[in-house]
Amino acid sequence: MKFLWTTIHVKDMEESLNFYQEVVGLKLVNRFNAGPEMEICFMGEDDTKLELICSSKIKNIQPGNAVSLGFKVESLDEMINIVKEKGIEIKTGPVQPNPDLKYFIALDPNGVKIQFAEQREI
């Protein structure tokens, strides 16, 4: 079995695309209308794939607090600066649970927890 993608229902497609392209660095791969009042975008490459769905039929989007998406960064300090420059609040961290990993958590425009992690290669 192979993992295909993670789906996030979004409130505003443009705001979400901006976040995942400019902050996370994902490439927009496909964008299309999926019927009346629904748009879908696929982002990412290789093993990192994200599906964004924006539908005016879905009124109450609640991402919950039990799931987060983790993205590897080369420099945590640089990513902290990027996030702060974009006016995005850091919710947790930076945290270093062991000598090989440090991370922080911010929220995407929909309230999904996004973990940016710098991991030392072992």
Image (cartoon, rainbow, N blue to C red):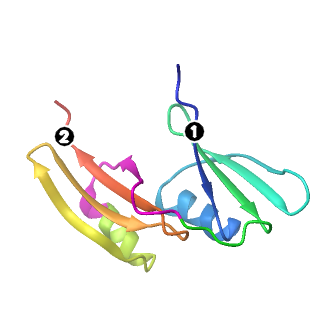
Residue 79 occupies which quadrant of the picture?
bottom left
- When the figure is inspected, residue 118 is found, relative to residue 12, above or below; the finding is above
Q: Which residue is mark 2?
A: 120
- When the figure is inspected, residue 45 is found, relative to residue 35, above or below; the finding is above
Residue 61 occupies which quadrant of the picture?
bottom right
Q: Check residue 64 for magenta coloring.
A: yes
Residue 9 occupies which quadrant of the picture?
bottom right
- Left or right of 38? Residue 76 is left
Residue at screen point 39% across, 56% down: 66
Q: Which mark is residue 39?
A: none
Crowding around mark 2 (Cα neighbors within 10 Å: few <14, some 14 to 19, many 20+) is few
Q: Which residues are magenta?
A: 63-78
As rendered, which of 96 and 113 lies closer to the eye?
113
Residue type at tag 1: Trp
Residue 85 at x, y = what percent? 40, 77
- Left or right of 38? Residue 85 is left
Which residue is most to the left?
99
Crowding around mark 1 (Cα neighbors within 10 Å: few <14, some 14 to 19, many 20+) is some
Secondary structure at numbered mark 1: loop
Q: Quadrant of the C terminus?
A: top left
Which residue is most to the bottom?
87
Residue type at tag 2: Arg
* Sequence-wise first label, 1 or 2: 1
Q: Which residue is mark 1?
A: 5
Residue 37 at x, y = what percent? 86, 63
Residue 45 at x, y = what percent? 56, 37
- Left or right of 71? Residue 122 is left
Which residue is most to the top?
1
Residue at screen point 55% across, 67% down: 62
Secondary structure at numbered mark 2: loop
